[in-house]
Image (spheres, rainbow, N blue to C red):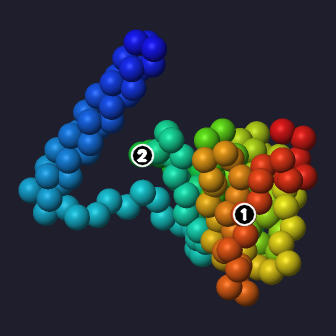
Amino acid sequence: MQKTTFSRLAIAGVITILIMITGLVTVAAQAQGKTEHVLTSGIPNPTGLAMDNRCNFYTADRNTGYVFCIPPDSDPILLAKVPDTPTAVAVDRLRNVFVGTEGGSVYLVSLDGDVVEAYRCNARPMGLEIDRDGGLVIATDEGEIVKVERKAFRISK
């Protein structure tokens, strides 16, 4: 019981410190007149944007289907290519990238570049989110919001 309380207090302390550091960095940037910072350029038509717990960003190029990881202060890393036009992106706590496409598929892109169709919608996914259990919440172009449990994914992971 005490171990759990200590762990929670330690986590809360770390979060508080991170918030303070973020605030100090923001204040310093504003003092220098900087209100924005270009993370990367050269992705012609990025579609969707998601961030993992390590502050890596993920996006997909609508023109090519390429899926990128953008590490902090580094150039984009090409992870894979999905076989359709991307419409939305999400990333789970294991850093698997989910990419919704115009054809209604949601592909899972692993960090090693494997691409598998994880789920098939009846409509085009326009927004993706990962729920706390690792399932998907999908907003479609037909006005539906669909929750898909992770066990329904067509993947072996």
Question: In which quadrant will I find the C terminus?
Answer: top right
Rendered residue at 13%/63% (across/down): 33
Asked if residue 77 shows in the view, the reply is no
* Neighbours of disc 1 within 10 Å: few (<14), some (14-19), many (20+): some
Secondary structure, mark 1, is strand
Which residue extends farthest left?
31
Q: Position of residue 121 (x, y in %)?
A: 83, 72
Asked if residue 132 shows in the view, the reply is yes
Which label number is shown at residue 73? 2
Rendered residue at 63%/71% (across/down): 127
* Neighbours of disc 2 within 10 Å: few (<14), some (14-19), many (20+): few
The residue indicated by pointer 1 is 147
Closer to the camera, 71 or 104? Answer: 104
Closer to the camera, 145 or 126? Answer: 145
Label 1 amino acid? Lys
Q: CA distance from mark 2 to mark 1?
A: 34 Å
Q: Position of residue 32 (x, y in %)?
A: 12, 57
Which residue extends farthest front?
1
Whichever of callouts 2 and 1 sits on the residue coming sooner in the sequence is 2
